[in-house]
Amino acid sequence: MLKCKNLLLLGPLLQLLLVLLIAVIGGQTETVPCKLKDAEYGKVCVCTSDYCDYLDNPTLSKDEEFALISSSKKGLRFEMSKGNFGEKDRYIIKDYEEPATETAASNDTILSRLMDQTLGKIFSQADSSTKPITRSVKLKLDRSKLYQRIEGFGGSFTGAVSYLVDNFKTQDIQDHLYKSYYAPNGLGFNLLRISIGGCDFDLAPWAYNEKPENETVLTGMDELDARDVLRLAQIKRLKEVSGVTNLRIKAAAWSAPPWMKTNNKWTGFGRLKRQYYQTWADYHLKWIDLMAKNDLPIWAISTGNEPMNGILFMVFVKFMSMGWTPQTQAIWVADNLGPTIRNSKYKDLFIFSNDDQRYTSPFWFKQMNRTRPNSLQYIDGVALHWYWDEIFGNSFVHSTSEYMANKIQIISESCIGDKPWQKAAPLLGSWERAEKYARSFLSHLQDGFHGWIDWNIILDEVGGPNYVNNTVDAPVVANTTSYTEFYKQPIFYIMGHFSKLVPEGSMHIESVASNVNLDSVAFKRPDDKIVAVLFNSGRADLNIDITDTIRGNLSVNVPARSIHTILYN
Ligand SMILES: *[C@@H]1O[C@H](CO)[C@@H](O)[C@H](O)[C@H]1NC(C)=O
Ligand SMILES: *[C@@H]1O[C@H](CO)[C@@H](O)[C@H](O)[C@H]1NC(C)=O
Ligand SMILES: *[C@@H]1O[C@H](CO)[C@@H](O)[C@H](O)[C@H]1NC(C)=O
Ligand SMILES: *[C@@H]1O[C@H](CO)[C@@H](O)[C@H](O)[C@H]1NC(C)=O
Ligand SMILES: *[C@@H]1O[C@H](CO)[C@@H](O)[C@H](O)[C@H]1NC(C)=O
Ligand SMILES: *[C@@H]1O[C@H](CO)[C@@H](O)[C@H](O)[C@H]1NC(C)=O
């Protein structure tokens, strides 16, 4: 404590030097705290070429030790604390406090919080300071009750992302974006979604083999499109600098080239022409091969993005889309796509269906099975988009898991700002939007989902670029005035509370809270350590009394509007 105080007396310049020194030693495996900034709707963390926050994964030195990572509406962002199970006293997680003076604020904050982390001083043992209300909850964790296996978490590398990254002024800031998501001291993501050809988050609609038209041999796709040359180089760089060892790429086509479609257009009421069913399957295979030959192996594809857009929702949807009914999709999958993939050298490729909202399920799959009883054999997983979940309840996913038992279920797209009543742009600093993510992650993981892929990993200040202005929010927002900084939104950290300490291969275990003040989900990792995500969305602080069947008891008090991830043996 004394030592800490002494250090804090040093001049601001020395403090800054110390921060930089700590940040630089050991390169990418060092913890660097968030550089908080007030934005219109709350707080964001600022990254520039020479500064970006990271958190080393905690190590535990003894059996009873635990590590706890905390974020809050007020301003905690991945604060790490440590303690022991079996202590009589209750641990208290102190919420972020605004620095006393505006001047010297950011530098001091960074330093003192860094010192706190280094010295493990975030906790203060229970002082009965006067708090207005405190709620309480008991949480029981039982690692012997195992549920689904986690495949992982990820984001999407759209044309918009590729464009923004390319415009950043330095390689360093690009690297910070990649590492922030995919490095172990970032969010530890391992899944990535990309489009086959274009999507709405592109500067213009596009597909492979737009020319020559009307030829089933697809001579127009023997090499990468220039846009994919750029995107591939970026993704390879992402792999390299983040050190992600298990990156799994899932791809989806938004639309075939117009000549293959009934309406000869990118959008509107249009489906694949019957005579091109095999051509469209070959198109997928050729594209997968093209990627593999360029050293970017593809893990999975879906049967196509949001097929309902091309048969029902043309009125609202102005971007690239291609319609399928479950009947036509069953025919295409059973007669063309399925055999084409399974008889190729990419026979182990995962195939997801139907990459659309939950209200289509399980009806979609039942209809497929009715049309071609063998069509579902080719489908390895169900991929759903979260957009209408508030209207269509969890019963849709429950009955889907039942009908599609033994298949993987993931969310393959999520973002906020898509609804007429929401602002169709990033709300910089919004904790409320992040809480929406937390609730949905919790609900889906509790309901047996195996993974989650979010939408654009970065967008600009207005939520684009998007060639039809279908703008939305994103977890990271670029400053396109300078192209020298980006802002990590609360959504970024909330996703990290689920992804960072829950690697691929972790198993969902039982966690039961005694009341609704706490929402939680827990996992047993491949290294047998336990991770639980604890979400207090209430306006009061919360006493959580955790009982683990093996480790014993732990009491912790967490602030209002906060989320935590605990790791222990
Ligand atoms: C932080 O430190 C730098 C370098 O000493 C200084 O220029 C800057 O004004 C400081 N920031 C604040 C908010 O005091
Ligand atoms: C391709 O076929 C369509 C429909 O039959 C026709 O309108 C179009 O002119 C053809 N394009 C070429 C380049 O032959
Ligand atoms: C698909 O339909 C067949 C009958 O054609 C039925 O035996 C089978 O159980 C169905 N599969 C599923 C997953 O419902
Ligand atoms: C998108 O918005 C910009 C700026 O408001 C406008 O110039 C452009 O025409 C819009 N594009 C579409 C497709 O609506
Ligand atoms: C982006 O950078 C510009 C200039 O560097 C600055 O004026 C502006 O406030 C920044 N935008 C945001 C959202 O912080
Ligand atoms: C742990 O907590 C449970 C439930 O709150 C309680 O029944 C038990 O006595 C506690 N065990 C110890 C060792 O304190």
Image (tube, rainbow, N blue to C red):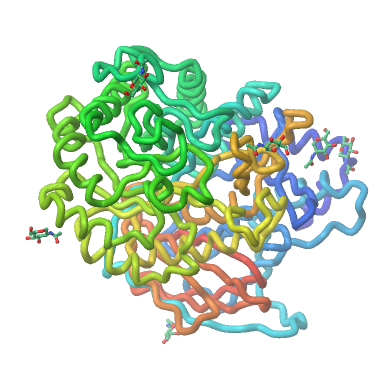
Q: Work out whether residue 329 or residue 546 is closer to the camera in this orientation and state it.
A: 329
The location of residue 529, given as percent across then percent down, is: 37, 57
**Image quadrant assignment for residue 287:** top left
The location of residue 94, given as percent across then percent down, is: 70, 67
As drawn, 348 above or below 437: above
As drawn, 285 above or below 528: above
In the rendered view, does 110 fall on the left or right side of 475?
Answer: right
For the point 11% across and 52% down, which residue is it? 373
Q: Work out whether residue 198 or residue 477 is closer to the camera in this orientation and state it.
A: 198
Q: Quadrant of the C terminus?
A: bottom left
- Residue 561 seen: yes
- Residue 65 seen: no
**Image quadrant assignment for residue 283:** top left
The location of residue 191, given as percent across then percent down, is: 41, 41
Q: Work out whether residue 362 or residue 27 is closer to the camera in this orientation and state it.
A: 362
For the point 17% across and 37% down, which residue is it? 338
